Image (cartoon, rainbow, N blue to C red):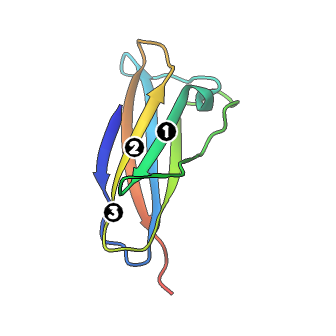
Amino acid sequence: MTRWLNSPVAPCGGTLVVAACVTRGGRAAPTRNIGSLLKAAVTLNGATATATPVLNDLTYPATWQAWRADIPARDAAEFAVAISSRLAKDADLSFQAWFVPHAEG
């Protein structure tokens, strides 16, 4: 599953954070080792970028995973986030993304 997003104008750059939340039947679904079951690939302006996972492969049960990607200073950027999942078929994923600008200076 791939989501295309556009970053805001960020003359100092920033950090993109994308989170995936896991539910089943509308309820939170804690999943052990979620980092090994959800992977992300980020493309920034057509080039591969590093997506650093927040949770490692071996974890306590968690209902989410998130990834950070550095967005360099520029007028704006187009990025795609592709999430691959090895979760059970009855698991539902929802996504949120945040852009945190770097401090000027």
In the image, 7: left or right of 57? left
Disc tally is 3
Amino acid type at circle 3 is Ala
Residue at the spot x=47%, y=25% of the render?
85
Residue at the farthest bottom position: 105
Residue at the spot x=66%, y=38% of the render?
56
Question: Residue at label 2?
Answer: 81
Instruction: Count residues near mark 1 (Cα–Cα under 10 Å), then give few for <14, some for 14-19, many for 20+.
Output: many
Q: Which label belongs to residue 40?
A: 1
Find residue 28 and report its horizontal and vertical position in percent.
46, 25
Find residue 13 and report its horizontal and vertical position in percent.
44, 71
Residue at the spot x=40%, y=43% of the render?
81
Rendered view: 46 above or below 22: below
Residue at the farthest front position: 47
Question: Residue at label 3?
Answer: 77
Instruction: Count residues near mark 2 (Cα–Cα under 10 Å), then give few for <14, some for 14-19, many for 20+.
Output: many
